[in-house]
Amino acid sequence: MMIRKEAIDLFRSDDLIGIGMAADAVRRKLHPDNVVSYIIDRNINYTNFCTEYCSFCAFYRPMGHEEGYVLPQETIFQKIRETLALGGTGILMQGGLNPDLKIEWYEDLLRGIKQRFNIWTHCFSAPEICCIAEVSGLSLHDTLRRLRDAGLDSLPGGGAEILDDDVRTRISRLKCTTQEWIDVHRACHALGIATTATMMFGTGESIEQRMNHLDIVRQIQMDTGGFTAFIPWAFQREYTSLGRFVKEEASAVEYLKMLALSRLYLENVPNIQSSWVTPGPKICQIGLRFGGNDVGSIMIEENVVSAAGTHHRATEEELRRLIRDAGFVPKQRDTLYRTYYLN
């Protein structure tokens, strides 16, 4: 495996083509069939009430705010019906940290979904799990076990941002600590719940702090094998309070370098996602030659990143064309990265 100093030196080099070719070689070794996958799912943000006041977020509303909401179950069920009608196989359900919602609310919702629909539930980030556990007076293990038994299938990697407490104190001081994020994902893996890992970079952190993040993900994967994918993406500053202090967003070159570095350093994580939502479709295509083997979701609905000023959209056929035009074979996958169709 690549050592930390080698990774830092590679990131600081000007050899963009070289780092891309090295990452592409790892991708081809892990995915030799020239396939790039995508998923049809829907982001459902069940509440925007949140107590964390993260400086990079333009989506949340403080408790009691007139623009705050908690979606009724029937509204969520209708969104799922629409997702299934579009060929969707899963939902990605996340929300703010709402202390009014205890575990029984989530259990009732999950059971209601599973009773009505055949759909994969990829739900609740580590900070949400910590909040549910705290307001319900439960351990992380018991919280996750009860959610799993009620119908939770897998956990997204959201809330990671940068897994370095100096960075977290600066950009999200009330959100879960690095250790709490680690504890949630390790507890998931121990319970047989697969998870993804994410990284939001470009908030003024150093490459050493980004490497702290990659070290954590790599070590957890060595110990548990529970991560299905790693998804790096760049901070969007437009409508956020943090944007006043971060004058320039990460460039396309920086995104491609981080994508390639993720593929090279996390060789034990099977899938790396090249995003089109924040950098746009053209950079996403280039990212498929910088280590990416997946382009994520068609995004039937997305509210969090769009609130920060990003509004790219794509249909299934547009994503398939994006993949084909980059020289790959598009295949629809499910949440666990199992592909469904041959062409």
Image (cartoon, helix red, strand yellow):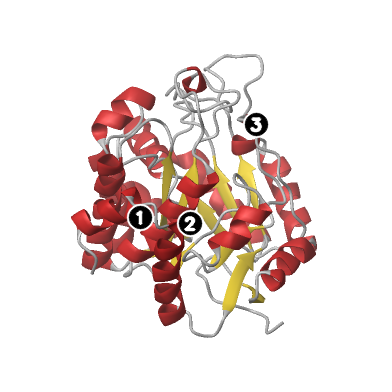
Amino acid type at circle 3 is Gly
Question: Where does residue 253 sit, x and y in percent of width and height?
Answer: 50, 48
Disc 2 target residue: 152
Few, some or many residues within 10 Å of mark 2 (<14, 14–19, 20+): many
Residue occupying the point 48% across, 61% down:
153
Q: Tell me what residue is drawn at x 39 percent, y 39 percent.
A: 161
Looking at the rendered structure, the secondary structure element under dot 3 is: loop
Disc 2 marks which amino acid? Leu
Check the picture and name the quadrant holding the C terminus: bottom right
Residue 84, placed above or below residue 162: below
Give the vertical position of 67 relative to 24 (above or below). Answer: above
Q: Are marks 1 and 3 in contact (CB under 8 Å)?
A: no
**Residue that mark 1 sits on:** 145
Task: Establish if 72 lies above or below 290.
Answer: above
Q: Which numbered tag is attached to residue 309?
A: 3
Q: Say which quadrant the N terminus sits in.
A: bottom left
In depth, the one of 159 and 278 nearer the eye is 278
Q: Secondary structure at mark 1?
A: helix
Determine whether, in the image, residue 320 is placed left or right of residue 126: right
Residue closest to the far front: 14
Among numbered discs 3 and 2, the one appearing first in the sequence:
2
Residues at circles 2 and 1 in contact by the CB criterion of under 8 Å: no
Q: Is residue 42 visible?
A: yes
Q: CA distance from mark 1 to mark 3?
A: 36 Å
Query: Residue 65: image x %, image y %?
Result: 60, 14
Q: CA distance from mark 2 to mark 1?
A: 9 Å
Residue pictured at 64% horizontal, 79% vertical? 340
Amino acid of disc 1: Arg
Residues at marks 3 and 2, CA–CA distance in whole angstroms = 30 Å
